[in-house]
Image: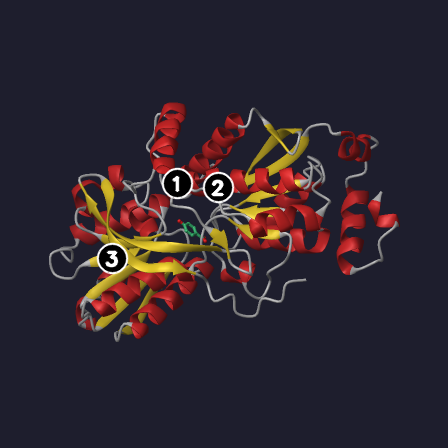
Amino acid sequence: MQQKTGSITRRNLGRLAGGLAATTLAAPALAQGGGALRVGLMLPFSGTFAALGENIAAAVDLHLQERGGKMGGRAIEIIRLDDESNPANAVQNVNRLLGRDKAEVLIGTVHSGVVMALVQASRERGVPLIIPNAGNVAATRSLCARTVFRSSFSNWQPAYGMGLALGKQGVKRAVWVTWDYAAGSESGEGFRDGLKAGGAELVKELKLPFPETNFQPLLAQIPDLKVDVVGAFFAGGGAVQFVRDYAASGLKDKIPLCGSGFLTEGTLGGQGAAAEGIRTALHYGDGLDNPKNKTFRDAFKQKTGREADVYAVQGYDAAQMLGIGLDGAKGDPAAEAAWAGAIEKARIDSPRGAFTLSPSHNPVQNIYLREAKGGQNVVIGIAAEALADPGTGCKMS
Ligand code: PHB
C-alpha cells in the first residue's frame, strides 16, 4: 500500500487511519486489481432539499449510463446515503461511507453545513471529493485542497450577480431575507458586494433558523425598511413556501422580490402564479440555447419524467468531472496528481455552457439574469460574465 512508501504527512496519516478503520482483505486487492470503484453519493433524499438531491443523483446516473457504467477503465458502483441536510449527523454519515461502505471517491452534498464533514474527510484522508451543490465558500477559499472540486457555485457567486444587476438598474436600497446558516449569510455577503459594486446598499438582513418556514414575522418587518427591492436565498420546499407567502402577504405588488436563482429553481410548479415575474440570478436558465443543454434536457426528461434544473446540471457535471479525473488517473483515485491535474486542465462541456475551474477549483461561469414566466426561468440577460469566486485565502497544498 502506498502509505508505506510516502512520507508521513498529516494527509498520509489520515489515509492510514481511514484505511485501518475500514480494514478488509478485499479493499487493497480491489484498488489495484481494477474491480468496481465505489463512489459514495451523499445527498439529501428527505427534508426540504429532497427534490434537489433526487435530481443530482438522477443526473449522475444519466452520465454514468452514457459512459456505459465505466470511468478510467473501471466499472463504477454508486452507493447512496441520505444525509437529510442534517449537520449534526454529517461526520457519522461520511465515516459510514468511507468505513462500512468502503467508498474511494465522494460526491456530495447540497447543504453548506453538511458539506464541511466531506471537505474535512477529503483534506485529511486524500479522498477525491466533488461537490455537486453546496456553496460554502470555505470549500474553495480557506479550506481549499487539491482533492476538493466543485461542479456548482460558491454561495457568493449568484447573489453577487443579482446585486450587481440591481445596482446597475438604479436600485438604491435592498434587504436580504434568508435562513440563518452558511448559505444564507454567504449569499447575503455576495448580494451586499454586488449591490455596492452597482452603487446600491444592503440595509438589513432578516433571518430565521434552517429549515423553518414561519416567514410571517420577517415579512411584517419589510414595509418599514423603505427598500426598493427584497432579495432572498431559499431553496427547495422552503422556497416554494416563501414565494407563496410573499405573494399572499400583499408585498408582491408593492416591492419586487428577487434572489439567488435557487428561489425559483425546480419550484415553479409549486409556486404557480406567486412566482410570475420574479427575477433571479443563477449560472443556469431553462432555455439556454446551446446544443448540449438541449440534448441534456431531453435525456433527463426521458429518464426521469421531470424537467431538468440547475441541480440536475450540477449532478451531471460532477459525474463528467469524475470521469475526466478517473480517465486521467487510469482509474486509480489514489493517483492524486493525475486525476486532479486532469480536472484542473479540463473545459467541461456543461449544459450551462462550457466552463473551466478557477485556481481554487470552483467553476468560472456566467451568472444569468432570469425571469419566471409561465413556469420557466427565462434567461433575459447576463448579470455577470465569466464570474470567478475570489478564492480568498486559498493555499493549494
Ligand atoms: C447550500 O446550503 O449551500 C445550498 C442549498 C441549497 C441551494 C443552494 C445552496 O439551492
The structure residue drawn at horizontal position 36% and vertical position 51%, both measured from the top left corner, is 283
Q: Is residue 66 left or right of residue 300?
A: right
Ligand 1 within 8 Å of the CB at mark 1: no
Residue corresponding to mark 1: 351
Q: Is residue 245 left or right of residue 57?
A: left
Q: Secondary structure at mark 3?
A: strand
Q: Is residue 75 left or right of residue 134?
A: right
Residue 89 in view, yes or no: no
Q: Earlier in the sequence, mark 2 or mark 3?
A: 3
Residue corresponding to mark 2: 317
Q: Earlier in the sequence, mark 1 or mark 3?
A: 3
The structure residue drawn at horizontal position 46% and vertical position 60%, both measured from the top left corner, is 182
Q: Earlier in the sequence, mark 2 or mark 1?
A: 2
Colouring mode (rainbow / by chain / secondary structure / one colour): secondary structure
Q: Nearer the viewer, mark 2 or mark 3?
A: 2
Residue 375 spot, x, y in % from top left:
22, 39
Name the residue type under label 3. Cys
Q: Which mark is residue 258?
A: 3
Q: Quadrant of the N terminus?
A: top right
Q: Secondary structure at mark 2?
A: helix
The structure residue drawn at horizontal position 71% and vertical position 55%, both measured from the top left corner, is 124
Name the residue type under label 1. Pro
Residue contact at pointers 1 and 3, CB within 8 angstroms: no
Mark 3 nearby-residue class (10 Å; few <14, some 14–19, many ≥20): many
